[in-house]
Structures are given as structure tokens and as C-alpha cells.
Image (tube, rainbow, N blue to C red):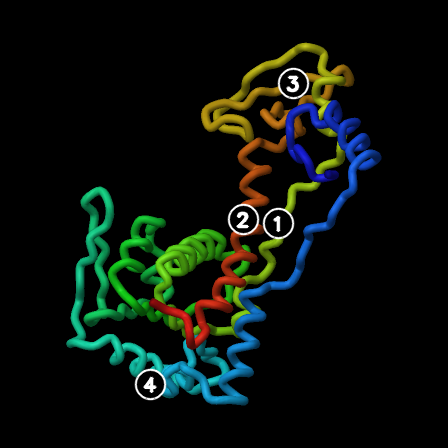
Amino acid sequence: PCGLYEGGINRAVFLPLVDVMRERLIVVEMGEKVDYRKEKGLMEESLLLNSSSSLDDNVALLPSYLVTSSNSELNVKELLSEWFVRGGGTERQEKVPVAMGRIINVKRANDSCAWFSFGELCHQPLGAADYIAIAERFDTVIVEDVPQMSGHCYNEARRFVVFIDALYEAKTKLVIAADVPRDDLFLGFDATVETNDGDEEIAIADASGDTFVIGEGGSSSSSSTTMIRTNNDRTVEWSATGRIGVSLAQLSAVKEVSFSFQRAESRLSEMTLASWGR
């Protein structure tokens, strides 16, 4: 219950209810920390090593997540080429239709497989609609030159997360050649906005009633910034959240970003299994 209405306006008024709930109700902890996607991967690896399985042996033996630092460049290219050949048909360029009459150019494709570099997918202004179109058109997608992603390539990392989500929902096979192991692919995206309960009241309690608008842009508006002058002659930016200097968009975005990267890492562990795909 301590997390109820977190980031809400005037949350301090709500907190007594949390105390009552904790006194009168039984709190059941639901914070399960087992990642069942990763557990499934461990079970499948054990199955392949210790017994015969129903999976096609060739598919099972061909890795779908390749670490370039652990393999020679030639070996990686050969493995990716083998995945590509399985798509069938002749290699060609293809224009994939996207929603709203747009198209995305695929430089290397065949009947059921597309081959991209990380730059082609994530250094371009592409979005969910583009990635969904790719996922629906191809049964297998190869992505090479995937770097370790941290705050220095935030936009590219966000696009890659959206790309993973699109392929996951379509159950499209994903083959990756990356610079680092899968568990190290996303680095340092556990962003948080730190505030204390009661902060949301500070701007109101200290306000002298003098508000004014300055400049353009700000945490509460894209066109202007509303400022509050406090009784001690301090000026702070007003926010729809009631928190000083923290906008409603910031609070929700920070939580969404942190969760989305954790989810992407978990989904990758399932998507690179031999049994994954439609």
C-alpha cells in the first residue's frame, strides 16, 4: 500500500488512508522476483543437453544470440548467413508497406527473412508502426552490430526496445550479433525521480500567491513555464504533480522507461530460445 497514488497531487492528504489499510488489512507480498522467461531458457538448455527433444536438431544447435567478442568476425558472418539462407528464395531488396501509406526499405531480404544492421533500425527516425510492419512481413529478423546500450545512446536504445516489443508480440524469430552478452546489453537504465512524501505540499504551503510565467518551455508545459514565488523570496517551478520541478510527464516517463528496459531484457531471453518463433 505504501506505493499507492505515488506521484499524485496532494498525496500527503492520502497517506492517512494508507496507515488505516496497513492496520486493518492483511498485506500479501506479490513481489515475485523469478523471471519465468529466463527460467524457461534454462529448462530448454537442460533439455537439449540431457535428452532428445522434439526441436529440430539443426535449429537447436544454431545459436540465435551471438557475441562478436567471443567469436571471430568470419564465424559470426557465417552463422548469420546460415540463418538468412533458411529464409528461402533469392536475396533481394524489398519495400515493406507501413501504415499511413509509408514504406520502409529493407536492403537485404528473402522470402521470410530480413537482415539489418543496428544502425539501419535504430539510428533512423523509425517507430512502432515500422517495426510492426517488419515483424508481420518476416518470420525471422537478423540484427548485427548491436552495441551495449547505456545513457549515451538513449534514443537508439528506446527504439530497440520498441523493436523488440513488436517482434515479441508477432512471435517473430530474432537473431542478434551483439558486442556483449545478453545480460549486459542494457546498462544503467534504472532511472528514478527521488522525492519525499510531503514535497508536493512545499510549493503550496510556502507560496506567497505570486505566480508568473517566464520564457518558453518547462516541466509543466511545452510553451511556457509557470513559476511560484515563495514567502522566503524563493522561486520554484510549478508542476501538475505538485512536486517541485517534476512534471507529470517526467514521473510517468521515468517509471515506464525503467520497466520497459527490464521487460526487453527478459523478453530477449525468451526470444533467443531455439523453440521461439511462429
Mark 3, other Cα within 10 Å: few <14 / some 14–19 / many ≥20: many
Q: Nearer the viewer, mark 4 or mark 3?
A: 4
Name the residue carrying label 3: 228
- Residue indicated by mark 1: 191
State left or right for residue 135 relative to residue 10. left
At a point 49% along the width and 62% down the height, the residue shown is 267
Q: CA distance from mark 1 to mark 3?
A: 27 Å
Amino acid type, mark 2? Val
Which kind of residue does numbered mark 3 sit on?
Ile
For marks 4 and 3, the one nearer the N-term is: 4
Q: What residue do we see at 74% from left, 39% from top?
A: 2
Viewed as shown, does residue 156 lie left or right of 50?
left
Amino acid at dot 1: Ala
Q: Secondary structure at mark 1?
A: loop
Please name the residue that numbered disc 2 is placed on: 257
Amino acid tagged 4: Glu
- Decide: is 221 above or below 122: above
Cβ–Cβ under 8 Å for marks 2 and 1:
yes
Tell me where residue 112 appears, x and y as whole percent: 24, 69
